[in-house]
Image (cartoon, helix red, strand yellow):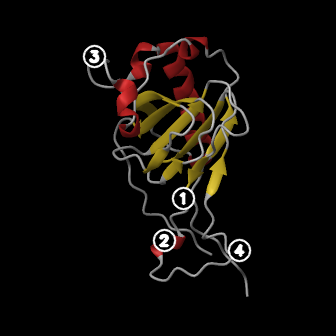
Amino acid sequence: MRTYEPFRYTFYVGTVKEDLTELCNCDDYAWSHEQKNRGEGRLGEPNFHVLDSLLQTKHLLERYVNDALHNNYKYVNDFRITTSWITNNNPGENIRPHHHKNSFYSGVLYHGDYWDDSGSLIFKNPIGHASPIELYSDANPMNDSIGIPPRKNLMILFPSCITHHCYDINRERISLAFNIMPTGTIGRSDSTCTL
């Protein structure tokens, strides 16, 4: 009997090689709910459009996004970054499990310095939890979550519906998060894959 694994989620992981000085010099952090005390004394709401004032970085990342999605999926749409924010987590803090609504793909760019214990970003596997019966086996990849440790200039693009978190932050951990949407008219494909 042949084995098929037809349903998959595509992640893009790579290193940004261009100069990120513009981004590295920005300290306009968006504090999370778990960091309320760190945001005290700040005026206004968190900046969820930080890349709108860092246009060199925004255009660079949009090139990476469009290259990845055009080359893999052959989309005719272009893609743009809609929202973006910089996080700064300290030891003992965490990133609660969440996913990004109202976007197609999301991304994170690690533009600081990191250590082995800076805390991996864990992506929860959604496939195993779709079944009414959770039956675990070390040999079943439908149950595995994945963890990606931060590295300088590492960028991860992932479907926005994937729940992710980090509970093991042991060193300062700065990153840029952003959401991506297609531009123009969105076409519909009713194609199926024949096995």
Residue designated by label 1: 124
Residue designated by label 2: 129
- The tag earlier along the polypeptide, 4 or 2, is 2
Q: Cβ–Cβ below 8 Å for labels 2 and 3? A: no
Say which of 28 and 103 sits in front.
28
Which label lies toward us, 2 or 3? 3
- The tag earlier along the polypeptide, 1 or 4, is 1
Marks 4/2: CA–CA distance: 16 Å
Residue 59 x %, y %: 51, 20
Q: Taking 129 as reference, is 37 above or below it? A: above
Question: Mark 2 is on which residue type?
Answer: His
Residue designated by label 4: 138
Q: Count neighbours of disc 3 (C-alpha within 10 A) and say few if under 14, some if 14 to 19, many if 20 or more.
A: few
Residue designated by label 3: 43
Q: Which residue occupies 66% across, 46% down?
A: 148
Marks 4/3: CA–CA distance: 49 Å
> Is residue 78 visible in the rendered structure shown here?
no
Q: Cβ–Cβ below 8 Å for labels 1 and 4? A: no
Residue 13 x %, y %: 66, 41
